[in-house]
Image (spheres, grey):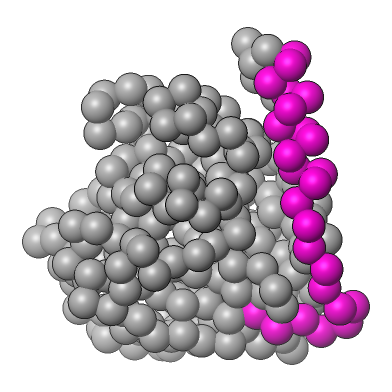
Amino acid sequence: MNADQPAADRSRQDDRFRSTPRTVRSGQTLMKITFFGHSALQIRTEDTTILVDPFITGNPLAEPVVSAADLTPDVILITHAHGDHWGDTPAIARRTGALVVANFEITEYLRKKHGHENVLAMNTGGAAEFPWGRITQTYARHSSSFPDGTYGGNPCGYLVESGARCVYVAGDTSPFAEMAWIGEELDVSVALLPVGDTFTMGPRASLRAIRMLDPAVAVPTHFNTFPPIRIDVEAWAKLVHDTGFVARVLKPGESMAVETD
């Protein structure tokens, strides 16, 4: 917890976090991922919708398949403050009342600039338990600032666990050694990895990440939105397959079920 965060704010945040009403059945829970393009995606459990990095408006991949007004998440995860990830967060949070999970700097910006109080501040390595599962905030090797230049804290990724399923949302990053710990300690069902190069790791560097994570399926993100990150994603998928892993390329608007072994 950030030492500068007022005690009253911390208490209010904890109350909101505990009061989030959710009920799920025990055993094998349903989990589905819907990709909207770039890094915007949705994870659906039995009765909870988790929206990740909702850059919809101005996203040439997402706008043909979804609008920000279509989305009704219970939880919004933000990996960092860059505009192509922060996106429509204030508008969606205001309309839906969703719990916004991010680092302390981002949640404070949302509270102070946009008046949204339903937030959960986390930091690298921290975890939060929900009735539907667990979220762990991971390291990401990147930068983070808001479109207005305000410092956005440390970038991050997330491990989203529900039942026997684990989805790793890497955020914007290059490979880092601790990915091996994730692969050793968890059975990663799906690894959502940026592959567009220039601002994140590219196709070949992502193979190192995949070897360390050892996921059941690797899914690419952060590619082909703008000219600097255009790649041949099918060639990437072939590289992954040739390395002995499974790749799944989702088109904008396409969904996939998250399977368990």
- Point out the residue furthest to the left here: 227
The residue at the point 32 percent across, 49 percent down is 87
- Point out the residue furthest to the front here: 95
- Point out the residue furthest to the right here: 26
User: Compared to 229, does 122 lie above or below?
Assistant: above
The residue at the point 59 percent across, 55 percent down is 75
Magenta-highlighted residues: 7-31
Residue 18 is inside the magenta segment: yes
- Quarter of the figure with residue 86: top left
Screen quadrant of the N terminus: top right
- Quarter of the figure with residue 103: top right
User: Compared to 231, does 11 lie above or below?
Assistant: above
- Of 34 and 69, nearer the camera is 69
- Of 259 and 210, nearer the camera is 259
The residue at the point 63 percent across, 11 percent down is 4
User: Compared to 65, does 205 lie above or below?
Assistant: above
- Of 244 and 135, nearer the camera is 135
Question: x and y percent of residue 199 in the render?
Answer: 26, 49
- For this view, does 11 lie left or right of residue 245? right
User: Compared to 81, does 4 lie above or below?
Assistant: above
